[in-house]
């Protein structure tokens, strides 16, 4: 039973969309936190999602808020495509 669950979970994670293209879209100003830049991530499932860069591209976040962030653009794009 445990082996069946493990195989199922690994196959489900294999269907997760992956980033195919990242392009600059625009910039914004937060009330608190300064400037940020918005990028469109085209995912392998055909959908486009947004990520943002903060603190002179040192922090990358899913969406346009300072939540769900990492220090790596590609890691953040992968999170956005899940």
Image (cartoon, grey):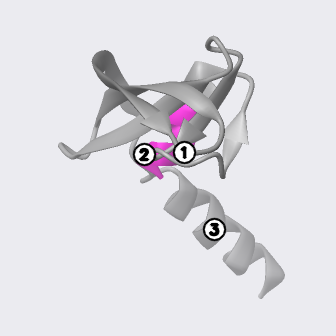
**Can you tell which mark lies on residue 81?**
2
Name the image quarter holding residue 39: top left
Image coordinates for residue 67, horizontal then vertical, percent: 66, 52
**62 with respect to 7 (left or right):** left
Is residue 80 found inside the magenta-colored segment of the image? yes
Q: CA distance from mark 2 to mark 3?
A: 18 Å
Is label 3 in a helix, a strand or a loop? helix
- Residue that mark 1 sits on: 31
Majority secondary structure of magenta residues: helix
Q: Nearer the viewer, residue 51 or 82?
A: 51
Residue count near mark 2 (Cα–Cα under 10 Å), binned few <14, some 14–19, many ≥20:
many
Residue extending furthest toward the bottom: 1
Residue positioned 56% across, 56% down in the render:
13
Classify the position of the N terminus by image quarter.
Answer: bottom right
Image coordinates for residue 63, horizontal then vertical, percent: 46, 47
**24 with respect to 7 (left or right):** left
Q: Which residues are magenta?
A: 76-82
Residue extending furthest toward the front: 31
């Amino acid at each position: 039973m445990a082996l069946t669950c493990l195989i199922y979970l690994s196959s489900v994670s294999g269907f997760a969309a992956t980033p195919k293209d990242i392009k600059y879209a625009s910039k914004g100003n937060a009330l608190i936190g300064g400037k940020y830049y918005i990028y469109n991530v085209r995912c392998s499932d055909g959908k486009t999602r947004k990520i943002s860069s903060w603190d002179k591209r040192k922090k990358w976040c899913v969406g346009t808020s300072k939540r769900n962030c990492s220090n790596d653009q590609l890691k953040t794009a992968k999170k956005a495509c899940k």
